[in-house]
Image: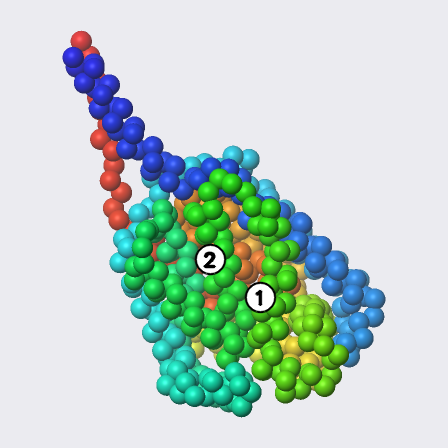
């Protein structure tokens, strides 16, 4: 009787534990995923080919840029940086993911807290504009310009940046509700409100990156927790499939902002305008990065890009900013040698400007971070699973902007760390049954 009773208890315990062990592992998609979920393969199959195309365009005599600094030496240096990121990320990739036995459980009310932070940040940033809806209508009707709206943008150090809590809310929502909730609840309403505010922000303040930072985690977490084991041919295309929607969004975003007011007289049609401008954003970013090194020197800059998160930290940042801020030199370069309209410095060459060839250690560190995040993504580790969807935006944009170490990236990552370190539910240990002997 004792043996039969013990066996029954073990079966009951196993039946309860099994869902917990597999709650984050939803079939083939969760185990293997799409190629673009893996940072190493993303660099190999998308970022490096894109870098090669832009490099060939710059080396072939780019006529749209007045002064091309980018040459074969800088092309090789940038390729080396990306290759190190890819290699280190690949070395940390295990062939088979290790499933988390008991994924961290986050109280649902944490979502209320994160939403309050994000919504408060938006009230500070957009309060002046939202209080005058007529000017928003005037903007979309062509009456008000983007500069009129930018003058109404609220900026309070350490508070307006809380809008970036939106980037943390999206993956947290999907992690908390790993199994879809039926019906409409307030957390879905929060998701909708933050999505609308982000979309509005991207239009009226011309912050397209803000929308990308929310859209990509949304897609990734949907694939992770909603898509199931069946694979989609469209999703298998990854960032390639996003090119057409990106062009369409760019057209919609720029139509009232610059097309009707100026560029309609420069380009034959809006499609040529959108494609050329998008290409210029990336080619000028790489050229600016090479120009900074050519004019300002290798290793001569303060680490204002690598430590951007520290410089922008409330109160503490004011202490470090005078020692690390090289923005005056960078602005001088744009005014005298570049184009202030196309001011992105790329996320590659700025590290050579700050550290010289030691920037390759920064590349190795970036690769290590992505190897950790991808391992956590595959295994279902709470923090890394959510952080991976946030960090992947920085990798996709590395040719254009140094976003990984930015203050706007620091907020969601730090918030996710706090949630999973201090706000998770205590782990309930299973009761092990000790069989009697004799």
Q: Which of 145 and 75 is in front in this view?
A: 145
Q: Is residue 320 visible?
A: no
Q: Is mark 2 on a helix, strand or loop?
A: helix
Is residue 169 visible to the viewer in this orientation of the structure?
Answer: yes
In space, the residues marked 2 and 1 are separated at their CA atoms by 22 Å
| Residue 331 placement, left or right of 127 | right
Residue 435: image location, x then y, percent = 21, 18
Which quadrant does the N terminus fall into? top left
Compared with 228, 200 (above or below) is below
The residue positioned farthest toward the top in the image shown:
438
Residue at the image point whose x is 40% and y is 42% from the top: 24
Q: Are marks 2 and 1 in contact (CB under 8 Å)?
A: no
User: Residue beneath label 2, please?
Assistant: 218
Residue 189, percent from left and from top: 34, 64
Q: Residues within 10 Å of mark 1 (few under 14, many from 20)?
A: many
Q: In this rendering, which labeled residue sits more in front, label 2 or label 1?
A: 2
Question: Residue at 53% of width from left, 90% of height from top?
Answer: 143
Seen in the picture, residue 69 relative to 416 is either above or below; the reply is below
Observer-nearest residue: 349 or 235? Answer: 235
Left or right position of 206 against 350: left
Residue at 36% x, 49% y: name it: 180
Count of labels in the image: 2
Which residue corresponds to the image point at 46% horizontal and 52% vertical from the top-left? 222
For disc 1, the marked residue is 402
């Amino acid at each position: 009787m004792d043996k039969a009773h013990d066996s029954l208890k073990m079966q009951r315990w196993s039946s309860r534990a099994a869902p917990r062990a597999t709650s984050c592992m939803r079939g083939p998609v969760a185990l293997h995923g799409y190629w673009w979920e893996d940072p190493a393969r993303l660099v190999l199959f998308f970022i490096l080919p894109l870098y090669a195309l832009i490099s060939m365009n710059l080396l072939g005599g780019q006529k749209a840029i007045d002064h091309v600094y980018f040459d074969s030496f800088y092309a090789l240096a940038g390729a080396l940086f990306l290759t190190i990121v890819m290699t280190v990320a690949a070395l940390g990739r295990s062939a088979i993911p290790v499933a988390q036995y008991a994924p961290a459980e986050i109280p649902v009310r944490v979502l209320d807290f994160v939403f309050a932070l994000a919504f408060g940040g938006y009230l500070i940033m957009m309060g002046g504009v939202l209080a005058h809806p007529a000017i928003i209508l005037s903007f979309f009707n062509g009456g008000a310009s983007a500069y009129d709206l930018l003058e109404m943008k609220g900026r309070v150090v350490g508070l307006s940046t809380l809008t970036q809590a939106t980037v943390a809310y999206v993956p947290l929502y999907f992690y908390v509700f790993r199994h879809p909730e039926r019906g409409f609840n307030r957390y879905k309403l929060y998701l909708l409100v933050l999505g609308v505010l982000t979309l509005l922000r991207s239009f009226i303040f011309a912050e397209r990156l803000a929308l990308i930072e929310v859209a990509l985690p949304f897609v990734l977490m949907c694939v992770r927790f909603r898509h199931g084991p069946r694979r989609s041919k469209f999703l298998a295309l990854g960032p390639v499939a996003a090119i057409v929607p990106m062009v369409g969004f760019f057209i919609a975003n720029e139509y009232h902002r610059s097309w009707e007011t100026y560029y309609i007289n420069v380009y034959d049609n809006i499609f040529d305008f959108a494609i050329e401008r998008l290409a210029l954003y990336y080619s000028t970013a790489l050229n600016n990065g090479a120009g900074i090194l050519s004019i300002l020197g290798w290793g001569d800059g303060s680490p204002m890009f690598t430590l951007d998160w520290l410089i922008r930290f409330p109160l503490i940042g004011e202490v470090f900013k005078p020692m690390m801020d090289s923005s005056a030199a960078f602005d001088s370069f744009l005014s005298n040698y570049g184009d202030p309209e196309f001011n992105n410095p790329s996320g590659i060459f700025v590290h050579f400007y700050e550290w010289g060839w030691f920037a390759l250690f920064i590349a190795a560190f970036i690769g290590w971070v992505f190897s950790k995040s991808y391992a956590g993504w595959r295994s279902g580790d709470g923090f890394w699973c959510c952080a991976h969807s946030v960090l992947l935006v920085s990798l996709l944009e590395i040719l254009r902007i140094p976003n990984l170490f930015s203050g706007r990236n620091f907020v969601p990552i730090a918030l996710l760390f706090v949630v999973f370190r201090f706000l998770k539910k205590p782990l309930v240990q299973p009761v092990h049954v000790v069989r009697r002997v004799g």
